[in-house]
Amino acid sequence: MSVLAILNRPSRDAPAHAPASPPFHFADAAEPQLSVLDLGATRGDGIFETVSVGYGRPQALEHHLRRFAASARTLDLPAPDLDAWRAAILAVVAELGDVDEGYVKTVMTRGIEGDDKPTGWVYGSPSPDHSRARREGVRIVLLDRGYRHDIEATAPWLLAGAKTLSYAVNRAVAREAARREADDVVFVSSDGILLEGPTSTLVFRRGNQLLTPGTGLGILDGTTQANVFRYAESVGMSTGFELAGPDALRAADAAWLVSSVRLAAPIRAVDGVDIEIDHEFTAALNEYLKRLEE
């Protein structure tokens, strides 16, 4: 089952596609909906968010909406009408019903080339089964991202830290991981600083402290990572941000890649070397993430 809602006016700063029509309408996800001239298709010129749905509730919705708006600012897109997007997301979630695990993807593009109306849609579906990754863990390789860790400050035009539709590199590193008999990737800056996964945030444990790479590194403000930290603090752990290199990951007591749909996948090997998995903490953390309320 899938649900699709098309927004009539994704931004109040731009005209509506159909004046006097409702803010959004449901459409058939199996039928063509996007113009071949849309810049999202021809240039990857747009932004997106993926919101986890647990037991019929969207997780970290307001955080996702704030990040959606931040990505729009970075790309000089019209500001999303967050009220319209929120309403469309909640409507799609309601149509999905009380699924144990699902997701909603929000997409806004610059629209048809030469036009001044952005394109926007919300797509919802039950999630794939990630239970094996959560239970057995993932093997990761460290790959050079090709930028220094301070790229966000030195070259903001490279859009580091924005969640854009330009995903060719992220797909390429997934294929490289498979060639190296791994499941996923953690990027490292050209000057040796741990960053993030292609679709996830890195979290690692040292003793009773849960850590994630420091801010200002041109990486996404992790919505799931924020909730992981909330859980850790609720069970008496301390949390923090750290500028760290690969040795810190290899020496960690445990580590995870966390993301909206897969949730917390423990890392079981780094560049072919096994590391410990904290199965008990991982299981409790994932149950917490699935049952979150905004």
Image (spheres, rainbow, N blue to C red):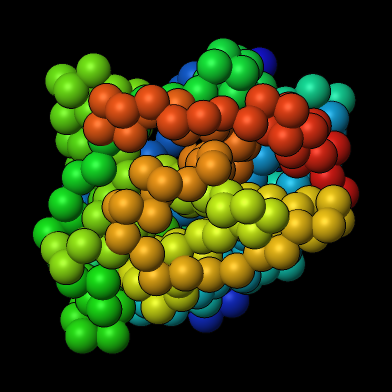
Q: Is residue 228 above or below residue 28?
A: below
Specify the quadrant of the image occupied by residue 254.
top right
Specify the quadrant of the image occupied by residue 100.
top right
Taking 36 as reference, is 220 left or right? Answer: right
Is residue 94 visible in this depiction of the protein? Answer: no
Q: At 25% across and 43% down in the image, what residue appears?
A: 142
**Residue 11: % across, % down:** 55, 71
**Residue 293: % across, % down:** 87, 49
Q: Is residue 2 above or below residue 140?
A: above
Foreground residue among 1 and 242: 242
Quarter of the picture containing the C terminus is bottom right
Foreground residue among 236 and 5: 236
Specify the quadrant of the image occupied by residue 16.
bottom right
Quarter of the picture containing the N terminus is top right
**Residue 34: % across, % down:** 38, 40
Q: Is residue 154 above or below residue 219?
A: below
Q: At 66% across and 64% down in the image, what residue appears?
A: 239
**Residue 102: % across, % down:** 68, 29
Taking 276 as reference, is 207 left or right? Answer: right
Taking 194 as reference, is 14 left or right? Answer: right
Q: At 72% across and 64% down in the image, what residue appears?
A: 238
